[in-house]
Image (tube, grey):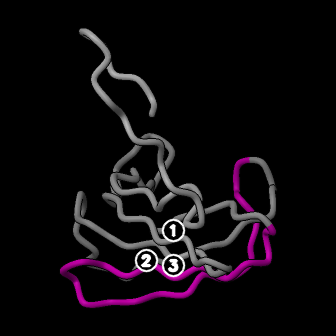
Amino acid sequence: MTLYEFPSPVETVLTLVHDTAGWSLQSHLGTHPSNGAPCQVFDLPDGTPNGNGVTLTIPGYPAAIYHGVLYLDLPTGAGLVIDIWPPANVNKTLPRLVESGQYLAQE
């Protein structure tokens, strides 16, 4: 089974770590079979369980670390459904919300 990801830039090597199966994979540059688009490819080991958690790391500053569920039986093949996203901007503080009548307002 193969998982295709499309980072920007496409040459970025990604890491995928399975929560329970005990493997860690690095992607390699390839092309998507249906449209020929360049992408990063993970060759998933035989016996990889369907519907289990994985962590996808995209290097950079700061590195983006996503957690998701790896599905092997989607109509398009393997797919990753993200359930934990990294912060959008680690150098920015979120506005404080305060009660304003029956609503919340930014302070």
CB atoms at circles 3 and 2 under 8 Å apart? yes
71 vs 64, nearest the viewer: 64
The residue lying at 23 percent from left, 64 percent from top is 52
User: Which numbered disc covers residue 2?
Assistant: 1
Q: Position of residue 106 (x, y in %)?
A: 45, 30
Q: Amino acid at mark 2?
A: Leu
CB atoms at circles 1 and 3 under 8 Å apart? yes
User: Which numbered disc covers residue 44?
Assistant: 2
Q: Quadrant of residue 5?
A: bottom right
Q: Amino acid at mark 1?
A: Thr
In the rendered structure, the answer to whether residue 40 lies left or right of residue 11 reads left
Q: Position of residue 85 (x, y in %)?
A: 43, 56
| Magenta residue span | 9-34
- Which one is earlier in the sequence, the residue at label 1 or at label 2? 1
User: How much space separates mark 3 and mark 2, taking CA atoms?
Assistant: 4 Å
Q: Quadrant of residue 89?
A: bottom right
Q: Amino acid at mark 3?
A: Asp
User: How much space separates mark 1 and mark 2, taking CA atoms?
Assistant: 6 Å
The residue lying at 32 percent from left, 30 percent from top is 98
CB atoms at circles 1 and 2 under 8 Å apart? yes
User: Which numbered disc covers residue 10?
Assistant: none
Q: Position of residue 79 (x, y in %)?
A: 45, 54
Quadrant in the picture for the C terminus = top left
Quadrant in the picture for the N terminus = bottom left
User: How much space separates mark 1 and mark 3, taking CA atoms?
Assistant: 5 Å
- Which one is earlier in the sequence, the residue at label 1 or at label 3? 1
Q: Is residue 54 magenta?
A: no
Mark 2 Cα-neighbour bin, 10 Å: few <14, some 14–19, many ≥20: some
Disc 3 target residue: 43
90 vs 39, nearest the viewer: 90
Classify mark 2: helix, strand or loop: loop
